[in-house]
Amino acid sequence: MNNAVPKISLKGLRKSFGDKVVLDDVNLDVMTGESMVIIGGSGSGKSVTLKCILGLLTPNSGSIKIDGTEMVGIAQSERKEILSKFGMLFQGAALFDSLPVWENVAFGLLAQRLHSRDEAKEIAIEKLRRVGLSPDVAKLSPAELSGGMQKRVGLARAIATNPEIIFFDEPTTGLDPIMSDVINELIVECVKDVGATALTITHDMSSVRKIADNVAMIYHGNMIWTGPKDEIDHSGSDYIDQFINGKAEGPIKMEILKG
Amino acid sequence: MNFLAVIGRVVISFLRAAGRIGLFAVNAFTHMLTPPYYPRELLKQMMNIGYYSLPVVGLTTLFTGAALAVNIYEGSARFNAESTLPTIVVIGMVRELGPTLCGLIVAGRVSASMAAELGTMRVTEQIDALTTLSTDPFKYLIAPRILATIIMMPLMLVIVADTIGVMGGYLLATSKLGFNSGNYMKSTIDFLEAIDVIASLTKACVFGFFISLMGCYHGFNTRGGAQGVGIATTNAVVSACIMILVSNYVVTEMFFSS
């Protein structure tokens, strides 16, 4: 009955910026070892959900539990301890320009002060190898890498501390279809290797089909559908059908400003 | 009525900004005093802020010292008081021009660089990435920058600025204005008091604090993309320069008001 407590649990999550309500009563459970993908159009609240879980934004109301521990209003020291369970791949990789690649990958290891710099460098090189990059890359600056390589380094950094939970924020945005597939494959392999629970936000359906165990769709700040990946094509939801088939016509109205 | 509302809005937004900057400063000091510490980051910032600012600070104060000597010589000649030149140059440089010029130059160089670097880190999610890697951005980014500037301004930059400024006056006076080298140095040393140096170094500390605070505050709170970084950089330099000039008057009053 270990799985009875969700790894990540969101209940009644609400977040607004001024008058604009971005999250309105978001509910979601992600079980241990599960790969959950949140889909939704631009501005639907995907990134805000992720930032609320990470504590980068404070929700107006609602509950966020990690392993049953409430994160909203938690003390800074306890939050830091729980954050050490997380790894994250950012949309633009978010590598630190001022550090060489290996220090980027080893940053979390050094921050937790569990390893010497030499040990951390060795682990970083091993993780780079895991994502298909040669040890030569370790001493380069992030600015010297292509977009695909930066994503790989970002992935190596996300898995470097063997986190229990990994977040992927639009992991294939800005990559060509082949590199997108390579990154998707790596994500699946790395999550399996580390044995982590994964939460991905994306609007790339090829990523969804490759990465997800379960899928949740967010629209106007509400989770309008949650279910297994295999059921997504037969969800019975017009919203899901429109989104996965990329149709302009349907219940989802894109907000387009007219001049 | 509308006019009063506009004034009210300006005052409220000014007070709000002052409050935010005050809280930011308190937060930065709290993080400076509590572990974990990042000595590697501190040394890197000390090198960048102190050592790499030396050429521009030295050059500026050298020529300012020389120009000051010419002006004082020409002015004092009107009432036959040319012999006061060394004294006025040293007091002028140490009490006022050394720290203020150095502060304004470092504000242009360091405050802008901090705001641009932190602003870019903000808009490319690098600051968020730090948080997800169990690292407090205040401890890792802000505290070392503020501490390094407060240390390097008095201990390296202003001492060098004062010394080179006085040397600029000395070189011009002895090579062009016919002053005797030994007498010039004797007058300089005899009339320089400890309080002048203490005031100079105090100003350096205060200026260093405002330079780094403004650079960090505006950079850390950058919004938007490239335009946001540009706005943050401009605001950092302008507000740092204003704070330097205002605090310069306050510190001068504290030390020398009769």
Image (cartoon, grey):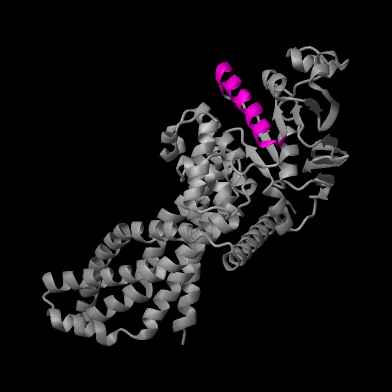
Tell me the quadrant of the picture where the N terminus of chain A can be found.
top right
What residue is at 75 percent from the left and 58 percent from the top? A75
Residue A210 found in image quarter: top right
Residue B85 found in image quarter: bottom left
Question: Residue B172's spot in the image, x, y percent?
Answer: 17, 69
Which range of residues does the magenta coloring cover? Answer: A175-197
Residue A186 forms part of the magenta stretch: yes
A246 up-or-down from B9: above or below: above
Q: Is residue A239 left or right of residue A107?
A: right
Q: Is residue A16 left or right of residue A85?
A: right
Tell me the quadrant of the picture where the C terminus of chain A can be found.
top right
What residue is at 80 percent from the left and 45 percent from the top? A67
Question: Residue A231's spot in the image, x, y percent?
Answer: 83, 17
Residue B239 forms part of the magenta stretch: no
A38 up-or-down from A165: above or below: above
Does any portion of residue B245 appear in the rendered image? no
A96 up-or-down from A200: above or below: below
What residue is at 57 percent from the left and 43 percent from the top? B126
Question: Residue A187's spot in the image, x, y percent?
Answer: 63, 28
Report the magenta stretch's main SS. Answer: helix
What residue is at 46 percent from the left and 70 percent from the top? B205
Residue B176 found in image quarter: bottom left
Q: Is residue A225 left or right of residue A88?
A: right
Badge count: 0
Does any portion of residue B14 appear in the rendered image? yes
Q: Nearer the viewer, residue B127 or B226?
A: B127
A73 up-or-down from A42: above or below: below
Q: Is residue B12 left or right of residue B125?
A: right
Q: Nearer the viewer, residue A80 or B187?
A: A80
Q: Nearer the viewer, residue B157 or A109?
A: A109
